Amino acid sequence: MNCAKWSPTNDTKVHTRDSNIELLRIVSIFLIIFVHQLSHGLGYNKGNIVANLFFGCFTTPVINAFIFISGYFGLRFKWKIFISLVLQAIFYSIIIYLIGILFFPNISFEIGLFIKSFFPLTTYLWWFISVYMLLYVLSPLINKGLERLNKRQFLIVTLSLLLLNFTLFFSIFLDVSHKNSPIISVCVNFIDFLSVYVLGRYMYANHIYPKKAFLKYFLACMLFIVTIIVFVLAFSNHNDYIGRVFRDNNPLTFLSGIYLFFTFKSMNLKYYRIINNTSPLILGVYMIHDHLYIRELLAKCVNFIYSISLNNTFLYIELIIFSMIVFLIAAGIEKLRRKLFKPVENSIEQYILHRLKFLKKA
């Protein structure tokens, strides 16, 4: 497999990458869309509660699996890509806000909110994008630092980050009065992303690759344990703890994400054009479906589906189909944005890089 450095929006030379990892990225965003319909739309108390919790358990590892891709293959910071990501986030923030004014009766134009829409990354509009961009910006420093470590030092740094990450999980899990603020959320999520990234770099650098026969059993075991814990909490009326079990820095979901990555990496799947052409669209899909206003709209659609569904079996089939439709529409919008606004985006990038000539050397 080609293990060249990976970048978040690099759709050039897509044909050089095998499709198994690209498929993982697509599956990850689809599962995120699906679980968001359960959590943001239904809530875990509608439909079949057991099924809701079951699906929640089996979709939690995908965030860590997604970040592990970046860690395993390594991020390579480029100003052009950074500017492209920032412009993409600003585009969707502004456009969705303006569309919300037109089609949502409870949303009116406010100069403060309009100005705020120009700063989606610093206002934490999409928590994942904000934290991921922070990791991306710091990746040159992280990579250079890790390259200077010997094997023993690298292991100590990796284990220390994992210990810190898991300690934060148990501290938050056991603190009943804990309430997340945006700053705390950024810090906790960044430490989780950094832990996953550094672990990925360590495993790649030291050629650590779990045996294929072991992968499915370990992954199934981790998810089974998470499921048991969630159901025990649910049926013992400790519902406040359930959401915390689903946190990305839970050691069980953390390890499940890593082994989910290796499960896909072990697949004998070479190049498929449709997979590799769809994969670069997924950040746009995420931004569209998880914007606050779109999330509200999708929640109304999900509750309508719930109200007309014949039974719970049909409900989950309908939600899966609905999630597929959301994915396809969002991917189509992102594809159209790229086609129509790429010339404008390129002009802005060239203008910025021309004004800041020293950045071209990065």
Image: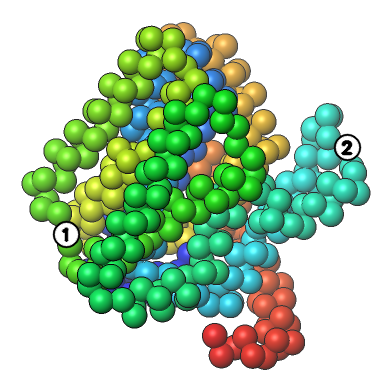
Task: Point out residue 90 in the picture as x, y percentages from the top left corner.
Answer: 71, 58
> Disc 1 to disc 2, how far (Cα)?
53 Å
Task: Using residue 52 as the reference point, say whether residue 126 is left or right of it.
Answer: right
Numbered marks: total: 2
**Residue 183 in picture, x, y percent from top left:** 63, 48
Query: Callout 1: 10 Å neighbours few (<14), some, many (20+)?
Result: few
Q: Regarding mark 1 in the picture, which secondary structure is present there?
A: loop
Of the numbered discs 1 and 2, the one sitting upstream in the chain is: 2
Q: How is the image coloured?
A: rainbow
In-front residue for pair 186/92: 186
Task: Kindly identify which numbered label has been placed on residue 340.
Answer: none
- The one nearer the camera, 195 or 104, is 195
Residue 51 in view (yes/no): no
Going by the numbered disc 2, the residue's amino acid type is: Ser
> Seen in the image, is 35 located left or right of residue 270?
right
Q: Residues within 10 Å of mark 2 (few under 14, many from 20)?
A: some
Q: Amino acid at mark 1?
A: Tyr
Q: Is residue 90 above or below residue 221?
A: below
Residue bearing the label numbered 1: 209
Residue under label 2, please give it: 108
Compared with 233, 251 (above or below) is: below
- SS assignment at label 2: loop
